[in-house]
Image (cartoon, grey):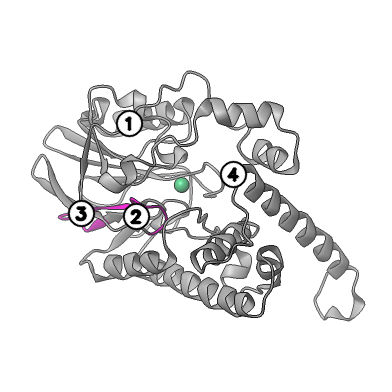
Amino acid sequence: MIIDEYAKGLFQVGGGTYAYVQPNGYWGQSNAGLISDGGQSMLVDTLMDLRLTDEMLTVMADAVPAASKIDVLVNSHADIDHTYGNQLVKGARIVASQASASEFFKVTPEYLVDIITNDHSEGGRYIAEKMGSHLFDYSRIVLTPPTETFDRQKTIMVGDKEVRLLAVGPAHTAGDVIVHSVQDRVVFTGDLLFLGVHPAIWAGSVEGWIDACDTMLSLDVDTFVSGHGPVTDKNGVRTFRAYLVEIRAETRKRFEAGLSVEEAAFDIAWSPPFDEWLSPERVVGCVNYLYRSWGSTDTIDDFVGVFAALSRYAKRKRATGAEHVHTASCGHAH
Ligand SMILES: [Zn+2]
């Protein structure tokens, strides 16, 4: 069953499997999931803050009584938009991959609030604009890490439903996990799948990420719940796989031609549908990451510095976009 509609809320995507979706998949607008059977429940990921996570848990409990007490939480990976709400499932087992365990809470709420409040550099201002306190509430967050980890594979029963966890990182991060609700033929991809929005790549491996897409495509399932973007089917996974292949190839050409990270990122002209995707400035982060993985020493290595580069890209894009509007010969209808 595929959802044609891309709206906020809880959607049944299988017998006892639900997607919680937050359009448009932008900064901190992550998706999560619920698997329930026989009075038991598994939550896949929490959200960026307590308010959003609490709202989600309330919607889930209203629709599915077993969700009023979550038995198991699986964190697909350690990023804060999938883990900052963990404390709200008190008493639940919290499961993640071994590889992701060391990645949890590298970015603390205190650190983030300090940047948002006190860092008036270009990168600090960009973070404040995209993830500031006007959007998310970082108070009262008690960092709540996994209570159990696994190496490559683990099966957990939720009632009579079999849920297979597959650790496929390094891909988006070192420790990404695919959550496969077997009988309901649904996969929660975490941030292995972005649709309609450019992905963030800070760590992990693009090669590993392409392999993870192949693993997802090899599964006998109908529905994929992306980490950011709409619910989809195998075509969505194929589209995102093509994105990764394209960014690797386009970046490699510019790397070999000696362009800097920022010049390379700006120079890439995207083919459809990627040219319409949100947050194109994230390409700088992806290019920066690829350059580093290819041994370049000319990369941006500090957290705020990467966001400064994203901000420069966005400004430059707006400036050239404005120029474009005024070009009479460009052949587009304005
Ligand atoms: Zn995310």
Nearest-to-viewer mark from 4 and 3: 4
Q: Can residue 334 be seen here?
A: yes
Magenta stretch, main secondary structure, is loop
Nearest-to-viewer mark from 1 and 4: 4
Which of the 4 image quadrants contains residue 84? Answer: top left
- Report which residue position mark 4 lands on: 303
Q: N-terminal of the two: label 2 or label 1? A: 1
- Say above or below: 322 vs 259: above
Q: Nearer the viewer, residue 162 or 110?
A: 110
**Element carrying mark 2:** loop
Q: N-terminal of the two: label 1 or label 3? A: 1
Please state which amino acid type lies under the numbered disc 1. Answer: Pro
Would residue 182 be counted in the magenta stretch?
Answer: yes
**Element carrying mark 3:** loop
Which of the 4 image quadrants contains residue 186? Answer: bottom left
Rendered residue at 54%/71% (across/down): 247
Q: N-terminal of the two: label 3 or label 2? A: 3
Q: Position of residue 99 (x, y in %)?
A: 30, 48
- Report which residue position mark 2 lands on: 189
- Report which residue position mark 3 lands on: 152
Please state which amino acid type lies under the numbered disc 3. Answer: Arg
Q: Position of residue 139 (x, y in %)?
A: 52, 20
Q: Are marks 1 and 4 in contact (CB under 8 Å)?
A: no
Q: N-terminal of the two: label 4 or label 3? A: 3
Rendered residue at 66%/74% (across/down): 269
